[in-house]
Amino acid sequence: MIGLLNKIWKNNNHIVFSIALILVAVFFIGMKNPDSGKTRLVLSPDKTGLMTQKIQSAIDSCAKTGGGSVVFSSGTYVSGSIKLKSHVTLQFEKGVILQGSDNYKDYRNDAFIYGKELSDIAICGVGIIDGVNCYNPTGEEGFRGPHCIRLINCKNILFKDFTIKNSANWAINCRYCSNGIVDKVSIRGGHDGLHTRFCDNFKVDNCDFRTGDDAIAGNDNRDFLISNCKINTSCNGFRIGCFNFTVKNCQLWGPGESVHKIQKRNNMLAAFVYFSPKDDNPKLISGNWLIENVTVENVDHFFVYNFKDGLWQTGQPLTNIKMNNVTAKGILGAFNIIGDQDLKFSMKLENSSFSFREGAVYKGDLFEDAKLLSPALFSAMNFNKIELENVTFSKKSESPILNFNSGKFLFFEKLNLITGNDSKPFSIEKVKSVVKNRITVNGQLDQ
């Protein structure tokens, strides 16, 4: 099965990618009850003291018998770091709280729950993992404690039905991991939600992430599907680098319900920001993105890609994106794009609408300390091809609300611009080929 999927994923076509995802779902059906017929150990909460050793002993014993499940019966379990083992499921019964110690000295491997070089692992059940915002004076930025879940080089991973709250650092941190399912998981507060680096084949479905920092982040990923999710944050919804990246049927909104702990603010910066940090030595060129049936509200920017000098965006370029049926309301900027000098970036946007935040004043100077092109709703420089078909942009402005510079090909079809004045609605410079059909400005067909 894995060999077959690898062959399929080498094809860039989204249809083929969808078929691959179906095969992945079939492959993981057994993960819904991976411990069936194996060892089942039941834990009960202690009234006082840490349960670290008792929980770890149960996991170790289960692994020694070939795997199975460690069942947490209803109640609160206070623990320091615990290590997962291959073929073992942590199963939460309703009413379970797995609560971290508030003493950072009770943790190892920078994690509350840790796994390395494991396979067939799962955490399931309607329980709560509480990181208690564990304070570490020697931690990242002088206060961050352990990640709630940290996995390195693991495969065949299932996270289902539980909630993570008050994570002292990232809620779920995965590096070099593959074949992951995150289903019906909620995240409340903390820092980053799901952060993956150098990972492949992840499916995130029916999740609800409301975080203080980036909700879904990571770089050098491959073959990700995010669907039917709710995203709220005081930073970015997606700060991502990925090849074969699909987001479907998702809702994103600001301001953030949980404060950004470093910057002490709640505004949601962007729905989508490219992520390819140069100092991480990225190898993968991101592309083949599909974003469709997505709603965004009260977020500062919809999409930011700045390969020139963007924060953590300059490692490897982004190539092609397709967006369909996107609605963004109450935004300050829809698109700010500065592609690479080789003009690899292309985008097709159709059946969508973007409207400026009423009453806001926005000069568009900076985004995360990097200079943007302009305050226009759509600004793009250094691109191969941009196609806009059946798209509406609405912003009352005396300057152009669309700005294009230094590209190969620009295509407009059924473009609707609402500016509220008689000024020129768009600016086009140094674009080799421009095709414009049926452009409407303030209700009048533009000649």
Image (cartoon, rainbow, N blue to C red):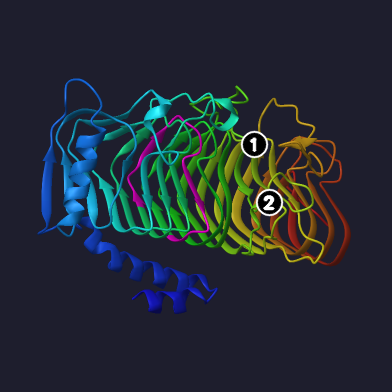
The verdict on residue 148 being magenta is: no
Count the numbered circles shown.
Answer: 2
Q: Which residue is mark 2?
A: 279
Q: Image quadrant for the C terminus?
A: bottom right
**Residue drawn at the location 52% of the way across and 77% of the way down:** 11
Tell me if mark 1 has few (under 14), some (14-19) or many (20+) residues whose alpha carbon lies within 10 angstroms of its own.
many
- At numbered mark 2, what does the secondary structure look like: helix, strand or loop? helix
Q: Position of residue 22 (x, y in %)?
A: 35, 68
Q: What residue do we see at 69% from left, 25% from top?
A: 359
Quadrant assignment, res 45 = top left
The x and y percentages for residue 47 are 17, 21
Residue 331, which numbered label? 1
- The stretch of residues the image draws in magenta is 182-201
Give me the residue at 11% from left, 53% from top: 39
Q: Foreground: 409 or 337? A: 337
437 up-or-down from 4: above or below: above
Between 316 and 268, which is closer to the camera in this rendering? 316
Quadrant for the N terminus in the image = bottom left
Q: Nearer the viewer, residue 56 or 337?
A: 56
For the residue carrying disc 2, how many other residues have a C-alpha within 10 Å: few (<14), some (14-19), or many (20+)?
A: few
User: Which amino acid type is marked by label 1?
Assistant: Ile
The verdict on residue 199 being magenta is yes
Amino acid, disc 2? Asp
